[in-house]
Amino acid sequence: MLSIIGFAVIASVATLLILGRVSPIVGLTLIPLLGAFAAGFSPAEITEFFESGLGSVLDVAVMLIFAILFFGVLNDVHLFNPLINFMLRVSRGNIVGICVGTVLLAAVCHLDGSGATTFLICIPALLPLYKRLEMSPYLLMLLISTSIGIMNMLPWGGPVGRAAAVIGLSPIELWHGLIPVQAIGLVLLVGMAAILGLRERRRIAARRNTPHMSGVGGRGVDGTEQPPTPSGSGDATDGPADGPAGSAGSTDSSNTPGPDLDASPRRPLANYLLLAVTVGVLLTDMLPAGLVFMVALSLALLINTSSVAEQMERVRKHAPNALGTGGIILAAGAFLGILEESGMLDSLAGNMIAFLPEILVEQLHLVIGFLGMPLELVLSTDAYYFALLPLVDNIAVQQGVESTTVAYSLIIGNIIGTYISPFNASVWLAVGMAGVDLGKHIRYSFFWMWGFTLALFAASVAIGVIAI
């Protein structure tokens, strides 16, 4: 009976999150509570389950809340603008250089862990340049999305915090094993960006030598046949016709408010020093991550504001994102506490082991990691980490596999695809800003991103991050 109820709880949460019928907080709180009552547990027992689950994720929630607020304040004072402008300046005019600069720029912008912020900075800054050189906006989406995926392995990025909450580990400790994976990923991505830049340069040269501007159809960047394009009109898929940036009309992002990249950082020396010390303390793990970010945020507010009212204004500006993420983690604690402490998860895992082929059971975490990228198109991030990961972890642990290996397998196998998923709200923001079609973005990017994921997965196995 526990297995049946546990499966019903997990399936219901995953289905409702995928369909968007409930918010993660609602689904992760109410459904396991109803399941616990259906299994015959008393309010006193459920209270114990809840307190146990909440205690296991409290540190993670605190760390995420204050990390998001801290990096939000640093973004407000334009701390990363000089590096952004430098990358734009050195790559201008060279298609391969622009592609490489795009991924590096996105990596820097995503230090705060917010995909929406990264898109808001990168797309308005780069789209006019892409259009002026007739580069595909879908290439821009692919490069930014892949770079964000690598940087999303930061402990305050979201997925690592979720995975850490599930397996009961500190996000910082989990991240330490992912640092070499991030480094390898950035090197591989620079190589992929250069290859895609060369391909794009050839496509643009071929396009300019093709008489489709006089009414002959051709192929779009996603491989589909394009109708004839009247002379002088822009192509919504490949970019604008020859002419000044912004002539494509519907794909112009000039009406979308973006960051002021001309603004100079305020009090740069103090802020850069604060950032360096914060990251250094996190790497040494000498203090709890939550405390580190609480202190860092406090110092950032003191350095960059002149009054209490301004300090509270900064906090209120970024509070929705911070509290939303923290609330999800706390609700996940209730979900996991009920599933684990009630015995539902262990019972379900035991029954699945009995039914699944032995070779699949032994390598289940690797199989799910291999399929992680495609699963991102059918599972939301919350469903993947809060419904699928706990089940795979329980099965794998019973086979002698460490929870960290399971978490790394599922994170590395899935995280690159986060910003191709239709369940990610910031993807819709990016699609609107870039003036592209989500379906074409998926078709253009999917196999490049999956291939990149598998290469990164193989590299993680080779260096021992994912144990086999």
Image (cartoon, rainbow, N blue to C red):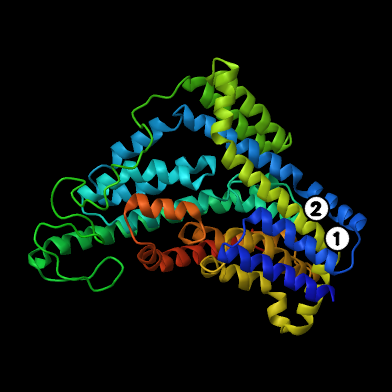
Asked whether residue 187 is in view, the answer is no
Q: Marks 1/2: CA distance?
A: 8 Å
Percent from the top left, x then y, of residue 37?
A: 84, 64
Residue drawn at x 22%, y 51% is 249
- Residue underneath mark 1: 341
**Could you tell me how many numbered marks the image carries?**
2
Asked whether residue 446 is in view, the answer is yes
Q: Quadrant of residue 362?
A: bottom right
Residue drawn at x 15%, y 55% is 241
Is there CB contact under 8 Å for labels 1 and 2?
yes
- With 242 as the anchor, is 468 left or right in this view? right
Q: Is residue 66 above or below residue 462?
A: above
Percent from the top left, x then y, of residue 228?
A: 14, 69
- Residue underneath mark 2: 53
Q: Amino acid at mark 2?
A: Gly
Q: Amino acid at mark 1?
A: Glu
- With 449 as the anchor, is 140 left or right in this view? left
Q: Residues within 10 Å of mark 1 (few under 14, many from 20)?
A: some
Q: Quadrant of residue 303?
A: top right
Taking depth in this image into account, of 213 and 268 the one nearest to the observer is 213
Residue drawn at x 74%, y 73% is 7
Q: Is residue 104 above or below residue 15?
A: above
- With 19 as the anchor, is 253 left or right in this view? left
Q: Residues within 10 Å of mark 2 (few under 14, many from 20)?
A: many
Taking depth in this image into account, of 152 and 348 the one nearest to the observer is 348
Q: Residue furthest top?
A: 306
